[in-house]
Amino acid sequence: MVNDCVSKIIKPAILAAKAYHVPDAKGFIKLDAMENPYVWSDDIKAQWTECLQKAELNRYPDANASELRRRLAAALSLPDGTAMMFGNGSDELIQIILMGLNKTSNVVMAPEPTFVMYRLLSSMMELDFVGVPLNKDFSLDLAAMLDAIKTKQPAVIFFAWPNNPTGNAFDQAALEEIIKATSGLVVIDEAYHAFAQKTMLSCLKKYPNVVLMRTLSKLGLAGLRLGMLFGAEEWIAEFDKLRLPYNIGTLNQLSANFIIQNLALLEQQAAQIRHDREAVFNTLVKIAGVEAWRSEANFILFRVSTKSADAVHTQLKEKKILIKNLHGTHPLLENCLRVTIGSDEENQAFLVALSSILSG
Ligand code: PMP
């Protein structure tokens, strides 16, 4: 009875979709979700909780997050005239961008494999998602992209830069060629900026059809849910109409205000992660039966050849280590897995476990 009612009322695209699955990670070494492994010192925690005392939870949050806006503009050295808006994670910003599309231009494009949310949210909104395969080495297939732009005329093209799950940052000249070739909006998603140490922010001034996203999630605040969208006032003003007025809660605003004063701490952690990424990579490639790709993010994509990725994933789980199995998600990711760079102890536990699984 209820089923009949649900299937009549809910969009077919939602009925057909699978919910985004987040595995229960209690008791695991958690290297599956690109989180920062470091917790704050007691001293920082005490300063932070003191800050939170200012919260007036009986009131709605500052709908504009003005204080946060001011602090971020100062901290990020944004190009003059750049407008910004915040999302409950950059996931929400992707959703907002897609919600704003004109009905007559409903093609969304991205090279694939990439961050799954671009495709997932597009299909839930009944938009036409076109994934253009990357080359085998995960570089951008520029000719295929330009061809797809010509034939499909996308309204929006998403580029995760560096890309998830491959870890590489596409060639910037190729990206700019695409930006010039499309009449659609290009979204540069710099979620992993802290680990790549390069930015395409300058494109905001150079091209009218570019906006750029960042997030605090990978930098160390995945629990906070704060995504940022930067672009010309004309774009941001429209997207801002789609944002729910109080999408960033008071506690989140206060916490973000606090951490911006302590950005050096997060940057130090990111530097440690970049350093450890190289060490993990160098060990990974020496394990027989492993092919790994260099990464500019806080994770590494690798392929196993002597056992299936499914078996490796399961056996790591038995050893209480959780990484991401990508086998079956895209033809280019056959027997591929993705490991997030954790603390030194976690990385060592993962490398030892993987070696023993592959030699067993
Ligand atoms: N963009 C990319 C490329 C990502 O990989 C992720 C998270 N995996 C996100 C955006 C979402 O980040 P947030 O936590 O800000 O929603």
Image (cartoon, rainbow, N blue to C red):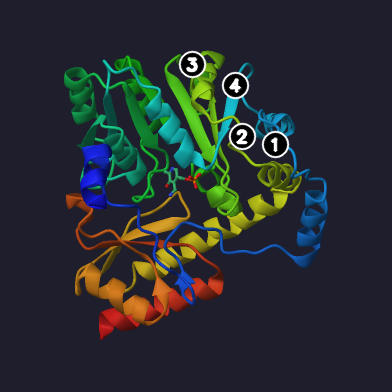
Query: Quick check: is the Cβ at mark 3 less than 8 Å away from ligand 1?
Result: no
Residue topped by disc 2: 246
Q: Earlier in the sequence, mark 1 or mark 2?
A: 1
Quarter holding residue 273: bottom right
Q: Earlier in the sequence, mark 4 or mark 3?
A: 4
Foreground pick, 247 / 299: 247
* Cα distance in 3D space between marks 3 and 2: 32 Å
Q: Where is the C terminus found, in terms of image quarters?
A: bottom left
Res. 190 visible in picture: no
Q: How many marks?
A: 4
Q: Residues within 10 Å of mark 1 (few under 14, many from 20)?
A: few
The location of residue 315, given as percent across then percent down, is 30, 79
Left/right placement of residue 16 relative to residue 60 reads left
Q: CA distance from mark 1 to mark 2?
A: 7 Å
Q: Residue at x 77, y 54 (%)?
A: 48
Marks 4/3: CA–CA distance:
15 Å
**Residue occupied by mark 1:** 60
Q: Is residue 287 above or below residue 276?
A: below
Task: Judge depth for marks 1 and 3 and give the one in front.
Answer: 1
Which of the numbered marks, if any, corresponds to residue 45?
A: none
Residue 74 in picture, x, y percent from top left: 72, 30
Q: Which residue is mark 3?
A: 206
